[in-house]
Amino acid sequence: MKNLAFITLFAIITSLVFIGCKKESSSDIGGDQSSIGEVGNNFSISSATGISNVSATVTKLENGISTIHVAGTITDPNIRALAATMSNVVFGTYDETTGNFTGDLKMKFTKEGIADQLDADGKSFTLAKFDGKVGDTYSCENAIGGTFTRTVTAKSDVDDFPYGFYNIKTMTIEGAGRFNPAIKNVKYRVNHRFGLVYTTVVLQDGSEISSYLYSTAEN
């Protein structure tokens, strides 16, 4: 399950615990619709240790919000044990016997940035604005008064991050693990052309789980 967080986008199954954002204090992303959020676009994940047969496809685009259907199989017994403690509301569907899971993520992809809608109230929480600067913050308040914040911690002006056959420029955004107490921090790397390209989940014991993300479509 820990690697599922890498899909939101998308920081995934762990991000589907719907404490939710009541409101976002920073303005939502603007811009024209990105091809990344169009119906039929597929995402793939590298190095998903303990999880197999992962698929992620945009199945719906409505009012600028893309629904991404995710499916796969948890093969690692430790991740299965963790998954079994979460309700089906969190996962969408999860079969403890086979390890098969499905879920639907709601994301917003534009030419100017990325936002998620992984909360009960359907409010956007900015993941990245491509013109952002180091020190920029994006925050949202949940229904019980807590505030979650993501901060731009680095932005390269040279092509120094390996991505497939390329080296690309990236922006790094970091935020605390909103929904799972085992997660200390989540680091996202984004690129203005390819969107979310890499995610690192930092666990409370200091260990890290990282994965590349690839989209068939691009900006």
Image: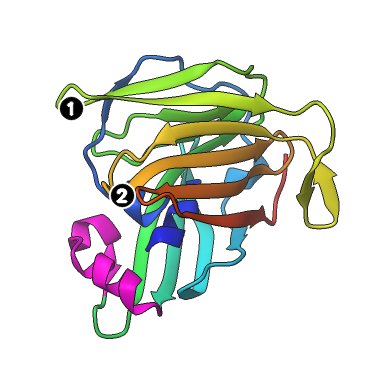
Quadrant position of the N terminus in the picture: bottom left
- The answer to whether any part of residue 53 appears in the image is yes
As shown in the figure, which amino acid type bears the numbered disc 2? Leu
Residue 27 percent coordinates (x, y) = 46, 15
The residues bearing labels 1 and 2 have C-alpha atoms spaced at a distance of: 15 Å
- The answer to whether any part of residue 7 appears in the image is no
Residue 213 percent coordinates (x, y) = 62, 55
Under circle 2, the secondary element is helix
Residue drawn at x 35%, y 56% as measured from the top left: 13
The quarter holding residue 102 reads bottom left
The first of marks 1 and 2 along the sequence is 2
Residue 135 falls left or right of residue 184: right
Q: Which span of residues is magenta-colored? A: 75-94
Residue 28 percent coordinates (x, y) = 47, 20
Q: Is residue 184 magenta?
A: no
Q: Which residue is mark 2?
A: 16
Residue 187 or 107: which is nearer the viewer?
A: 187
Label of residue 143 in the image: 1
- Could you tell me what secondary structure mostly forms the magenta stretch? helix
> Is 2 situated above or below 38?
below
